[in-house]
Image: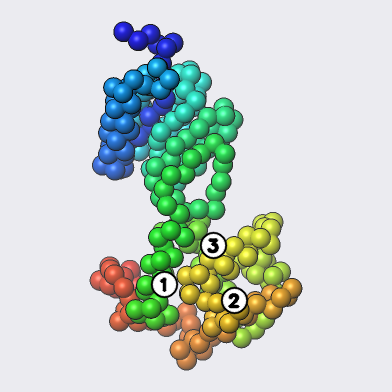
Amino acid sequence: MTQANDTWPVGILFSRSGIVKITESEHFRGTALAIEEINTAGGVLGREIAPVCYDPMSNVSEYRRLADKLLTEDGVSIIFGCMTSVCRKAILAALERRNGLLWYPANYEGFEYSPNIIYTGAAPNQHTLQLGRFLIEKYGNDIALVGTDYIFPRETNRVLRYLVENTGRLVTHDDLLTAVWRDVHVQPEVLKTHILAIRTALGDDSGNPTFIETQRGRGYRFIGQMAGLTPEAKSEAPLDLGVFAGRVEPMRELLAA
């Protein structure tokens, strides 16, 4: 039998109970199968991989606690785990403090980098932008973007909304930073990143813009057509579901709520 000190211990931190049970159980089985196949083939450098498995029960606090336990009490330096961004972020501090390494298997929203995480899933530029181009080509530019309440759609849509509400007016960098990130210090590069994301989603060309015009060194101007809406009517205008791609009935229920 292989002795414990002759193995490579790795942590497996996927929930097999709770709200993410179905998806993370599949991640757990896939990871266990891969370890079994590697060990059957002779292990790594002649040593078997010894999985140390915990069930965080879909609880963010448990992910944080168990990740710290793996990296300290269990002597693990590599963890395979987490499916959601909130859980990944919950254990990030422990990973960086203990110099552990997380292999993260799911898609993620980007705008985060840590040398202690291997992001194996696709980022928005690998799937969302392609979908955006398809929708614009098929349905035109009058498309509603509905997002879950987390940082990427929230921040990007706040930038776009401010530009649209100030159609035709030159909006300086300081105007945008003050309006969107009030009382928060944000580097200008963050604003440029969100402007780029909006342009990409709209299929806009910065050299020959249709929606957002750049005044170099000064700011931005939204020059897109607003389909006849007056500034007072923008917030009251109903969404035309005729060009809404996807879940039309749920959207009607949301608007009626």
Task: Give the residue type that dot 2 points to.
Answer: Ser
Residue underneath mark 1: 133
**Label 1 neighbour load within 10 Å: few <14, some 14-19, many 20+:** some
Instruction: Give the mark nearest the N terminus, 3 or 1.
Output: 1
Q: Residue furthest right?
A: 217
Residue underneath mark 2: 206
Q: Position of residue 70 (x, y in %)?
A: 45, 24
Looking at the rendered image, the quarter that the N terminus falls into is top left
Instruction: Give the mark nearest the N terminus, 1 or 2.
Output: 1
Instruction: Classify residue 244 by image quadrant.
Output: bottom left
Instruction: Give the mark nearest the N terminus, 3 or 2.
Output: 3
The residues tagged by marks 3 and 2 sit, at their Cα atoms, a distance apart of: 21 Å
Instruction: State whether residue 181 is above or below residue 4.
Output: below
Instruction: Classify residue 4 by image quadrant.
Output: top left
Is residue 55 found left or right of 94 in the rendered image?
left
The residues tagged by marks 1 and 2 sit, at their Cα atoms, a distance apart of: 16 Å
Residue 143 badge: none
Q: Position of residue 134 (x, y in %)?
A: 37, 72
Task: Give the residue type that dot 3 points to.
Answer: Glu
Is residue 50 found left or right of 40 in the rendered image?
right
Q: Position of residue 179 (x, y in %)?
A: 64, 68
Front: mark 3 or 2? 2
Q: Position of residue 241 (x, y in %)?
A: 32, 79
Residue 155 badge: 3
**Residue at screen point 48% across, 40% down:** 118
Residue 165 visible: no
Task: Give the residue type that dot 1 points to.
Answer: Arg
Secondary element under disc 3, as helix, strand or loop, is helix
The residues tagged by marks 3 and 1 sit, at their Cα atoms, a distance apart of: 21 Å
Is residue 22 found left or right of 173 in the rendered image?
left
**Label 2 neighbour load within 10 Å: few <14, some 14-19, many 20+:** some
**Residue at screen point 41% across, 70% down:** 132
